[in-house]
């Protein structure tokens, strides 16, 4: 997730672009840049001036403070890297070989490698490692003096997601934007016009915007805008009135980043899967693993290390890898792993899972594993962070920046990568047949849609939050793939509501936790359709027999669970293997609404930091 903004008008562009970037920082913060068309007056031809910096916005602000980029047309971006590490070269804007056209982009170009290969053959020179740069060279390829036409032709060749803003020094009177899968809005005022990823960037200038839809191209000139589709047909667009203030707008109207991020999960999973499934749907494409392919085909053991929520993802990973790839998998909390003298060798793959890529214990564990000869693969959300840099290979989650301290979309995106990795390994090691892989891929692709459905209705969750927010404790029970879901549900409520909670494998009930059951204890039972459904149902009956309060998470149309539960939250029907991607969401929401009722500081719970960089 990155943020882009463009300006055209009578004022100086730079201060407006910098102000917009400040408002968009929540969308990314690893590098920034801007391009301004320097109109040096009538006597000299205008030229594009570009300034970029790695790091936060203040680095760019310092860079342009001494020698401002003067001009009234410009584009800029805050980046959240997905392809190419977050450095100055990879920061946006990118420009074409002639220095005529500059572009900023939010999204992922899936087919950038093929496009780049063709463009290189045609003589284009690339400077960065980004997927974005192919776009500007493609536009250059089609440019015959009409920027809009060239953008239209270029986008027809592109697969993936994009919101772009483009300018050309040969057409200083226009700002061109387009979108597919990534948000873009446009607005015009008196003798000026704007493009932006999101409303906060424009709130200081306008309260009326046009929301662009997929495959629409907009040409903004001072005081007017025209929207056409990719076929060139002019479209009539309504203006939307904005009633939010800046803080509300950054959260897209959600009261907290955590709730926004819970709702971003369908999109985060889509982005994580994007470009990694072959068009034939029977193969997972992970070019990032190419250099390890021989090793992955013959390795003998996997150890997954991680902390907190990422450790829960690892536990789900163990179930999916062992049952589908038939390879032994150990899972360790990083801080235990690094001090326990683990048994591993050159035939071991150590997988480090981390949202931030900076967790000190995971980094130390990985280094320990390296000294013992293991190969390291990381699964990470922050491009270019320390853990991926210390790994032999990395598969990035594309969840976008996670701002709330309690992890939600990073968790489900980590699971999505683990599914991809499982199916990839299943194919590579011939543990899964091609038809089986296809069947599972098709199911995995259905998940974002199922999540959207699940997020539509929160009635029962709100009811449970209202009734039980005063509870002294919570118990969470699950089995097999959903045992880690129980741990994650308990962690979420502990973190943000400060209510004591325990997560248990339901089979362990009789070995201790059953003593806790009483008429005031809510017990969340994760019981979707599965091989262990009947076992879960027996556990639920045991709790009811002791007068515990049962909140069940079950598959839609389940006829038996309601007879034994006080409340049932339904999830859409999916294959058992993928149920952890759905069952966790009601638990995130339950924790969220309980914390809200208790008046807790949800996005920044006490004593917690987003990234734990000390031991
Ligand atoms: C829980 C949470 C933490 C992190 C843990 C690991 O909501 O956010 O438990 O999961 O600190 O952090 P990363 O994934 O950055 O290594």
Image (cartoon, helix red, strand yellow):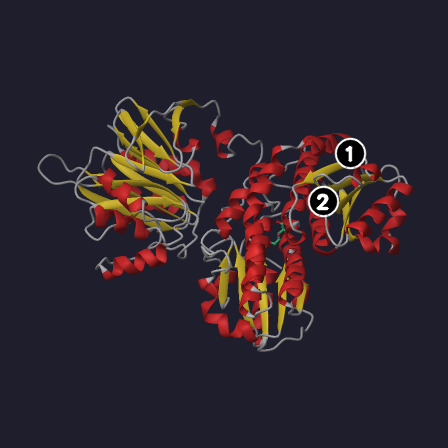
Q: Give residue 494's mark.
A: 2
Left/right of residue 373 with respect to residue 166 in the rendered view: right
Spatial CA distance of label 2 from label 1 is 14 Å
Q: Is residue 317 above or below residue 193?
A: below
Q: Give residue 468's mark.
A: 1
From the Cβ of disc 2, is ligand 1 less than 8 Å away? no
Work out which quarter of the rendered image holds the C terminus and state it.
Answer: bottom right
Give the residue furthest to the front: 435
Residue drawn at (49%, 34%) of the image: 250
Left/right of residue 220 with respect to residue 59 in the rendered view: left
Q: Earlier in the sequence, mark 2 or mark 1?
A: 1
Image position, residue 108 (x, y; %): 41, 49
Q: Quadrant of residue 22?
A: top left
Work out which quarter of the rendered image holds the N terminus and state it.
Answer: top left
Q: Dot 2: few (<14), some (14–19), or many (≥20) neighbours within 10 Å?
A: some
Image position, residue 163 (x, y; %): 37, 41
Which residue is nearer to you in this view: 115 or 99?
115
Which residue is nearer to you in this view: 484 or 172?
484
Image position, residue 323 (x, y; %): 67, 63
């Amino acid at each position: 997730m990155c943020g882009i903004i463009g300006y055209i008008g009578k004022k100086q562009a730079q201060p407006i672009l910098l102000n917009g970037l400040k408002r968009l920082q929540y969308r990314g913060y690893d590098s920034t840049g801007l391009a301004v068309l320097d109109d040096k007056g009538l006597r000299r031809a205008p030229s594009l001036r570009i300034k970029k910096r790695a790091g936060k916005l203040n680095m760019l602000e310092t860079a342009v403070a001494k020698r401002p980029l003067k001009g009234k047309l410009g584009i800029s971006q805050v980046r959240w890297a997905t392809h190419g590490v977050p450095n100055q070269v990879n920061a946006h804007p990118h420009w074409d070989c002639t220095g005529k056209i500059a572009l900023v982009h939010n999204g992922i170009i899936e087919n950038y490698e093929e496009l780049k290969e063709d463009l290189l053959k045609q003589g284009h020179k690339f400077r960065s490692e980004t997927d974005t740069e192919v776009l500007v060279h493609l536009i250059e390829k089609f440019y015959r003096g009409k920027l809009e036409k060239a953008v239209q032709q270029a986008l027809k060749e592109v697969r993936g997601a994009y919101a772009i803003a483009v300018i050309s020094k040969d057409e200083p009177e226009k700002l061109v934007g387009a979108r597919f899968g990534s948000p873009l809005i446009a607005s015009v005022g008196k003798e000026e016009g704007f493009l932006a990823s999101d409303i906060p960037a424009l709130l200081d200038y306008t309260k009326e915007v046009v929301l662009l839809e997929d495959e629409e191209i907009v040409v903004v000139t001072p005081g007017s805008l025209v929207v056409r589709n990719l076929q060139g047909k002019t479209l009539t667009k309504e203006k939307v009135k904005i009633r939010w203030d800046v803080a509300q707008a950054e959260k897209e109207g959600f009261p907290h980043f955590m709730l926004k991020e819970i709702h971003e999960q369908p999109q985060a999973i889509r982005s994580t899967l994007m470009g990694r499934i072959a068009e034939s749907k029977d193969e997972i494409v992970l070019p990032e693993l190419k250099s390890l392919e021989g090793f992955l085909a013959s390795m003998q053991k996997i150890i997954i290390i991680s902390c907190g929520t990422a450790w829960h993802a690892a536990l789900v990973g163990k179930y999916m890898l062992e049952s589908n790839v038939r390879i032994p998998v150990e899972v360790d909390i990083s801080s235990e792993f690094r001090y326990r003298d683990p048994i591993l060798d050159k035939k071991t793959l150590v997988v480090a899972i981390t949202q931030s890529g900076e967790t000190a214990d995971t980094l130390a564990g990985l280094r320990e594993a390296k000294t013992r000869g293991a190969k390291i693969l990381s699964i990470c959300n922050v491009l270019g962070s320390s853990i991926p840099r210390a790994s032999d290979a990395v598969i990035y989650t594309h969840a976008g920046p996670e701002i709330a301290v309690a992890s939600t979309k990073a968790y489900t995106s980590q699971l999505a990568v683990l599914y991809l990795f499982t199916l990839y390994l299943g194919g590579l090691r011939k543990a899964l047949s091609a038809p089986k892989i296809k069947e599972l891929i098709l199911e995995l692709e259905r998940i974002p849609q199922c999540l959207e459905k699940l997020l539509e209705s929160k009635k029962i969750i709100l009811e449970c939050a209202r009734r039980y927010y005063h509870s002294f404790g919570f118990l969470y029970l699950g089995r097999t793939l959903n045992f880690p879901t129980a741990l994650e549900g308990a962690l979420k409520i502990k973190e943000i509501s400060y209510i004591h909670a325990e997560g248990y494998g339901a089979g362990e009930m009789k070995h201790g936790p059953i003593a806790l059951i009483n008429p005031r204890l809510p017990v969340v039972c994760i019981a979707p359709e599965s091989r262990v459904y009947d076992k879960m149902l027996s556990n639920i009956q045991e709790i009811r027999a002791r007068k515990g309060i049962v909140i069940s998470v079950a598959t839609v149309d389940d006829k038996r669970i309601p007879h034994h539960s006080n409340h049932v939250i339904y999830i859409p029907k999916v294959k058992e293997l993928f149920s952890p991607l759905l069952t966790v969401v009601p638990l995130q929401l339950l924790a969220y609404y309980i914390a809200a009722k208790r008046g807790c500081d949800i996005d920044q719970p006490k004593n917690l930091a987003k990234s734990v960089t000390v031991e």
